[in-house]
Image: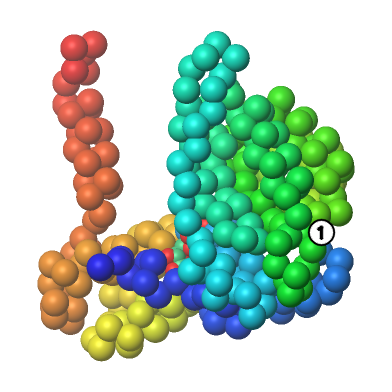
Amino acid sequence: MSLWADKYRPQSLDKLTYHNDLSAHLKKMAHSGDFPHMLFYGPPGAGKKTRIAAVLREIYGPGVERVRISTQIDQRQFVTPSNRKLDLNIVSSNYHMELNPSDVGMYDRAVVQDLIKEVAQTQQIDANAKHRFKIIVINEADELSREAQAGLRRTMEKYMTNLRIILCCNSTSKIISPIRSRCLLVRVARPSEGEIDDAMQAVAKKENFSLPHELSVKIADESDRNLRKALLTLEATKVQEPNLAQVQKIVKTDWEIEISNIADLIIAEQNPNR
Ligand SMILES: Nc1ncnc2c1ncn2[C@@H]1O[C@H](COP(=O)(O)OP(=O)(O)OP(=O)(O)O)[C@@H](O)[C@H]1O
């Protein structure tokens, strides 16, 4: 059973419920022959990854179902110059590959370069594929070391014919300017409270319950307009109090409670032992 935040994630650009101009623009670009490298940025839970996944679907058209079926998670091992073994999870399909290189810390440069080279050097096998290029999605790109970014920049130039990079991060300030200037910058802003309300109401409808407007606004407000957090909070609240009309207090997510407990402990007794 998956969480509502995953279960009801819109799959295509047409189904995205806000920033409609941006969706239309991305759609146009996906169908033009000329797809640039892209840098998606914006606050947590604003919908960056959802949007990127929708763009991939749009680009690879009818083959998109195959993307889903053939998408798999690989665990790959890299050996560092000092012979340490590192594991990295990679989500990939015939058309794309998705990585979190920051998971391997200071070895990110080697990993990024190896993987990109590997993808760039394998031709698209599917002769019916609409596009000749593959896409590599790099998450948490702002955590990449400068060396990794410099390597990435060279690779972007070298393999432009059969490879596009989509970077995803919170802020562009840690991305080196030669990369920024080679990418189309796509800002995914926080949805408004009204838009969060709409998204939660849509989930409530699919789950067959009614969500009082005041509660919805309260959740939107308390979640800092982070849509994922709002959906998680809604689900946790509904589990605890199935009759939402009676909810007095919004349920916080486990990690929030945990962090708040830790903070209380630290404040209660301020010594090195604690
Ligand atoms: N346009 C949209 N309409 C409705 N729901 C959406 C939309 N975009 C995202 N969501 C929902 O919001 C949640 C957060 O989206 P997503 O994971 O894409 O955010 P993100 O910006 O990539 O977050 P982070 O930076 O924290 O990884 C998802 O659970 C998804 O279901």
Q: Residue 204 is drawn in which quadrant?
A: bottom left
Residue 39 location, x and y as percent? 71, 52
Is 128 drawn above or below residue 124 in the view shown?
below
Q: Is residue 196 rendered to the left or right of residue 48?
A: left
Q: How is the image coloured?
A: rainbow
* Residue drawn at point x = 25 percent, y = 33 percent: 263
The local secondary structure at tag 1 comes to loop
Note whether ligand 1 is within 8 Å of mark 1: no
Residue 21 location, x and y as percent? 70, 77
Q: Residue 95 is drawn in which quadrant?
A: bottom right
- Is 189 or 61 nearer to us in this picture? 61
* Residue drawn at point x = 86 percent, y = 41 percent: 158
- Is 67 or 25 nearer to us in this picture? 67
Number of residues whose C-alpha sits closer than 10 Å to that of mark 1, classed few (under 14), some (14–19) or many (20 or more): some
- Is 244 or 74 nearer to us in this picture? 74
Q: Is residue 133 visible?
A: yes
Q: Is residue 26 visible?
A: no
For the image, the number of numbered tags is 1
Which residue was labeled with disc 1? 36
Q: Quadrant of the C terminus?
A: top left
Is 17 drawn above or below residue 170 in the view shown?
below
Q: Is residue 178 rendered to the left or right of residue 264?
A: right
* Residue drawn at point x = 22 percent, y = 33 percent: 262
Residue 93 location, x and y as percent? 57, 59
Q: Residue 4 is drawn in which quadrant?
A: bottom left
* Residue drawn at point x = 24 percent, y = 56 percent: 252
Residue 226 location, x and y as percent? 45, 60
Three-letter code, disc 1: Pro
Q: Quadrant of the N terminus?
A: bottom left
